[in-house]
Image (tube, helix red, strand yellow):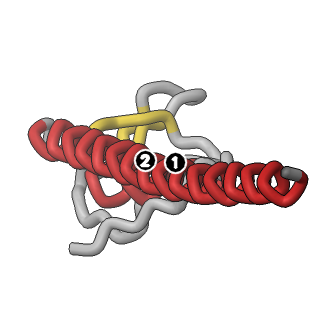
Amino acid sequence: MKKFITLIIIGWMIFNLIFLGINIYNFRVHQKEILLTSARETFHSILLIRKWNAIHKGVYVPVTKNTPPNPYLKDPLRDIKVSSKLTLTKINPAYMTRQLSDLFKEKKEFILELQV
């Protein structure tokens, strides 16, 4: 009788270990699906923001230490001096995406790399 109870307990433990393994596997698969969905949504959001910026042929923002003028942007209207205290610089889609990427890295959210 003692052997029978021991076998039942061992069988029950094996069953639970298999069930636990299946649950851990399913959890990881589900977690990867959620992360992939989130990454796709973020990617599509950034593409829409880039498109919006491109539709407006760039946007103007105040010049700051974090937003210096883009040295690669060849546009006679790149910088606009509004007053003695305010200068605006044009941000094109590529420069905006670069700044977003730097901000995401700084906040340790994720690494953003768009390959074109």
Spot the residue most to the front.
Answer: 1
Q: Position of residue 1 (x, y in %)?
A: 84, 51
Q: Callout 1, which amino acid?
A: Phe
Any part of residue 1 in sight: yes
Task: Say if 99 sits above or below 38 in the image.
Answer: below
Q: Which mark is residue 73?
A: none
Q: Position of residue 54 (x, y in %)?
A: 15, 46
Q: Callout 2, which amino acid?
A: His
Task: Say if 7 sits above or below 66 in the image.
Answer: below
**Which quadrant is home to the C terminus?**
bottom left
Task: Name the one closer to the observer, 95 or 100.
Answer: 100
The secondary structure type at the circle numbered 1 is helix
Spot the residue most to the right.
Answer: 2
Any part of residue 96 in sight: no
**How far apart are the two marked residues, 2 and 1, measured between alpha carbons?**
5 Å
Q: Residue at x 45, y 60 (%)?
A: 112
Find disc 2 in the rendering and name its residue. Answer: 30
Q: Position of residue 73 (x, y in %)?
A: 30, 64
Residue 3 falls left or right of residue 37: right
Residues at marks 2 and 1 touching, judged by CB atoms closer than 8 Å: yes
Q: Residue at x 76, y 59 (%)?
A: 7
Find disc 1 in the rendering and name its residue. Answer: 27
Q: Position of residue 89 (x, y in %)?
A: 40, 44
